[in-house]
Amino acid sequence: MALVAIILPTNSDATLIPDAYIVEYSDKQQGDSILSSLDGLTHPYHIRQTYASPVFNGLSLHLSAASRNSTSNNNGSITEAIDNIHPILAYLYAHPGVRRVYPVRNVPRPQWVDRKDINETSSLPYDNKLTQLKGMYDQMNLTGAGVTVGIIDSGVDYDHPAFGGFGPAHKIKFGHNFVDPANDDEHAGSHRLENDPYDLCPGNDGGHGTHVTGIVSGVDMSKNFSGIAPNVTIGAYRIFGCTGGAAEDVVIKAMEMAYEAGTTWLGSVRMIGVPFNMLRSFIGCDIINLSLSVESAWPENPMAVVADRLAQKGAIVVTVAGNQGGQGVFMQTSPGSGTRALTVGSMENTFRYDKVLHASVFPNQSYPYALSTSTENMPDGKMLGIVFDEEKHVVDGCSNSTLEQASAHDKILLLRRGSCSYDDKLEIAKQFGAAGVLFFDEEASKDNHEEPLLTKTSSGTIPSAGIANNDATKLIKHYRSNTMTDIILSFPSKPEKIPVNGPLRISDFSSTGPTYELGLKPTITGIGSDVFSTLPRHNNGGWGILSGTSMASPQVAGMAALMLEWYRRKGITKLDPVFLAELMQNHAMHIPYDGTPEHPLRQGGGFIQPMDALQSTVHVSPGYLSFNDTANMQNVHQLRITNGGNSKITLDLNNRVSQAILPFNGSTGYTPSEPSARDNTSVSLVFTPPRVEVQPGASINVQVTIHLPRNESTPWRYQMYGGFIEMSHKGSNKVDASVPYFGVLGSVQDLPLFDAGYPYLTSSSDTSYNSSDPFIFNVTAQEEVPKIVYRLLTATARADITVLDERNTMVGAIDGGPYTYLDRNNLQDDDKHSSIEWNGRIVDPHDTSNNNTESILIQPGTYRLHMRALRLLGDPQNVSSWQEWISSPIMVVN
């Protein structure tokens, strides 16, 4: 019997769409029967989408309005509820031909992390030597010709010079427009037909799909601009309009449509006599890019499920890891949480465009700065003022006694980060007549000492900005040595191109894995920071620089197109996406972190190196190893090494460890650290054999055995250890292939689910109740209804809420449950906690699967709400795998 998937979003933009559901059939024949039965029901509904493909059979529908429990996060947005179960929904739950029912989420409109309005650049979007694109173009003559890439996004300005039009004679040959014409009429003044994916939205806050499409394939040599795969064919699917998000069922329909593009249908038979697998060699999008997401690290999310199945059928699905890098572990997103989805994290570019200041004493140097949150621009042509304390340190400006009128008046003060707030510093500086303030952090970590300090300030104060510690140090040193020379500061309005010095690094915004089922994500890394590409022509002249994993994903999609073209030249028309992901991970460049390789949960296999991947003769499968946690650990794995060359190879295996990720701060219990910290915890790996000889065309298995550090010497605090298994030619330091690995020291099932003080009972108007205060609930008037407020430290695959009478006997379950695949809460203001209201109705106490046809109003009496949640990786049949909470009394009256 089917079990409804109730998924509570943990992002205010990812709310559920009331009364909308995705229904998956067990097979197409069952679907025909179900549709016929629905036609015989008298209850109103309408079908939103239909699905009929080897990937997904089913439909999405919208039911007539029904009263619903309301489930919300603390900003008040409705996220899930069902009251009296709609007869059609009850019918679907009980039907043996229904495989699964999903509520429909709203997918938030994709956003970039940073934008710079620069429409002139003298360099390509990337360093083509670092990306290996120069070799792919010049030596291998690869351009993506013959490969089709589907882009599911906000549409595209296809009349941009970088694309040249739309239709069979152009690069962008086909597509679809899913946006409601009424929405476009309201916000854009007109609309396009269903087969026209043109982005017609006005203003400068859109253009996401045009930017993504340019990264994949745009070409405009007047700007010295070329996308990754300039000769691919593009299919554009416009799912985002000018405002708001897009429904999950629409995203899934676009995925199906991209996969099926060009398929000829004859009734219910597709090109009679031609096997489906043969069709896949010449129809449909070979690669589907989705630079979009909802925050869910569960592989069971419907978009993740469809992405995984598409990959099983041969489509290469490339998508984003997410932009929640500051929010700790388990912050991967869907559809990227799909097992076989090629999920892309972001690394920094080798250059960036920043606002810069110039100092008169250093005429040929530029210093990046970051305006404070309340500052629009800095005053130009002012003198720099620096004040030192008795210990010769630059003052922090937290005390009147540390400043002097002569050193501050009409100057831009340089102040170090200190014990008081930035607003306090600015108020004191203002009292001394300062024209502005530059802040720096002398305790910045080695990873941030070249980054401008980010500062949050209130409006109504003097202008301020942050600069890098390194740059502040240069100015201070010159000031000390040349006290008679004034330093005049200028702030040009146009950003400048700044080389990024030092080692490459993962972008701070790039989300950290793993999935909740301890799968490695991201898969691979691309450049997502400061990427120059196309925008709609009315938007900043048609060009701009954006940052986000949305920009890294199309880079990898374009590189996948070049790799696929290369294999097709060799006669391999269909490439297994899992093999391709392994190839990318085997031969990626490891991005460093503090002298070690960055953790695989931050970079996946590393930065994609497509030329190395194609030219190497070594292939290793699987592409990564997860040792799970200690309770579920598989301490022995097998790696299969294949020699695709013409001569024997001898490889030595080595364990290259990364710094471990610390998910929790010991001083704050099990609240996930945001962002996560690091330590030097590592594991030992034993390879059997440690050296292998592989004959041409042959494969050999290597056994990998893990040895954990002793808990006594290295206390297990859920450190997420990791690193790379490197394979090098005998006697050489050159790495021929590598495999990332990770695991967790500790049993994640022992992690608490509920934060201290949660759950608690309140009312719909947020009146608090302690354990002895009864909640008086007039179930007829419904003026104040009980509300459970909860905060999840750890995700749960299932939560149930039942009703207990005075003898602690369960009398029913509240409608709407069980709630499945809940993500953890975080420290962001809109996601610190979530809540569920109860309207006084219950369903059969022996069946919490929502297969009941109706609920009943509870009788007057005294009751308590009982919430239990399944611990991560827990066994639902084991009582100890659940964490429980019982509310204070609720006195139900009529």
Image (spheres, grey):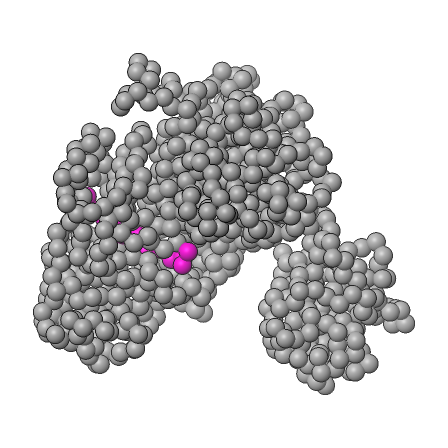
Q: Is residue 36 visible?
A: yes
Q: Is residue 303 magenta?
A: no
Q: Is residue 189 left or right of residue 823?
A: right
Q: Residue at x 31, y 74 (%)?
A: 766
Quadrant containing the N terminus in the rendered view: top left
Residue 627 percent across, percent down from the top left: 39, 44
The residue lying furthest to the top in this view is 273
Q: Nearer the viewer, residue 302 or 379?
A: 379
Q: Is residue 652 visible?
A: no
Please, is residue 398 above or below residue 169 in the view?
A: below
Q: Is residue 9 magenta?
A: yes
Q: Is residue 78 left or right of residue 772?
A: right
Majority secondary structure of the magenta segment?
Answer: loop
Res 455 → quadrant: bottom right
Q: Nearer the viewer, residue 173 or 822?
A: 173
- The residue segment tinted magenta is 1-13
Q: Is residue 2 left or right of residue 574?
A: left
Please, is residue 427 above or below residue 174 in the view?
A: below
Q: Residue at x 30, y 20 (%)?
A: 266
Q: Residue at x 72, y 48 (%)?
A: 497
Q: Nearer the viewer, residue 105 or 712?
A: 105
Residue 535 percent across, percent down from the top left: 60, 43
